[in-house]
Image (tube, rainbow, N blue to C red):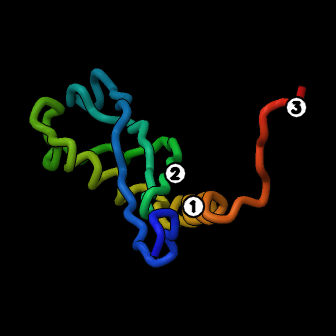
Amino acid sequence: MSSEDVSENPITYTVTINSVVMYPLFNGLTNVIKSVNCFYTAVQGTLTSSLPFLAELPPPASDEFTPYEQLTNQEVITWVEANSNLSFFQQILNQRLNELKTPTVVVVPQFI
């Protein structure tokens, strides 16, 4: 298998957080995350494709609320994964990876 042949390599998907949108005050709670700006990335061998997306989160129950300062990156990613249609994004990313493997369109520099 050459370094460019990725057909047998598994695809790894990763959610990364770019930023969060918060309510400063929501139902008596402070700094409540409303939504998360993310990237969903697929890597297969040497090929990579990413999609930006916005994950809207449901309001927390006051008895389950974790103060923003105590949240970990992984906790927020878990919420994002639970509230996003990642299988749909995977389909798009898989199509993009396939396009990278066998392009149907090629862009060339302007011919002079």
In the rendering, at what x and y percent does residue 77 appear? 29, 49
Name the residue rendered at 45%, 64% in the picture. Answer: 3
Q: Mark 2 or mark 1, which has the lower sequence index?
A: 2
Q: In this view, does 32 lie above or below 88?
A: above
Residue beneath the point at 27% across and 55% down: 78
In the rendered structure, are the residues bearing label 2 and label 3 in contact, judged by CB atoms less than 8 Å apart? no
As drawn, 37 above or below 79:
above
Q: Residue 49 carries which label?
A: 2
Residue density around tag 3, few if under 14, some if 14–19, many if 20 or more, within 10 Å: few
Residue 35 position within the rendered picture, expressed as x and y whole percent measured from the top left: 40, 38
Residue lying at the far left in this picture: please name it.
70
Mark 1 vs 3, N-terminal side = 1
The quadrant of the rendering that contains the N terminus is bottom left
Task: Decide which of tag 2 and tag 3 comes sooner along the chain.
Answer: 2
Q: Name the residue under label 1.
A: 97
Q: What residue type is labelled 2?
A: Ser
Residue holding disc 3: 111
Q: How crowded is mark 2: few (under 14 residues within 10 Å), some or many (20 or more)?
A: some
Residue at 56% from the left image edge and 65% from the top image edge: 94
> Is the residue marked by circle 1 packed among few (<14), some (14-19), or many (20+) residues within 10 Å?
many
Dot 1 falls on a residue whose secondary structure is helix
Secondary structure of residue under mark 3: loop
**Which image quarter: residue 101?**
bottom right
Q: Are marks 2 and 1 in contact (CB under 8 Å)?
A: yes
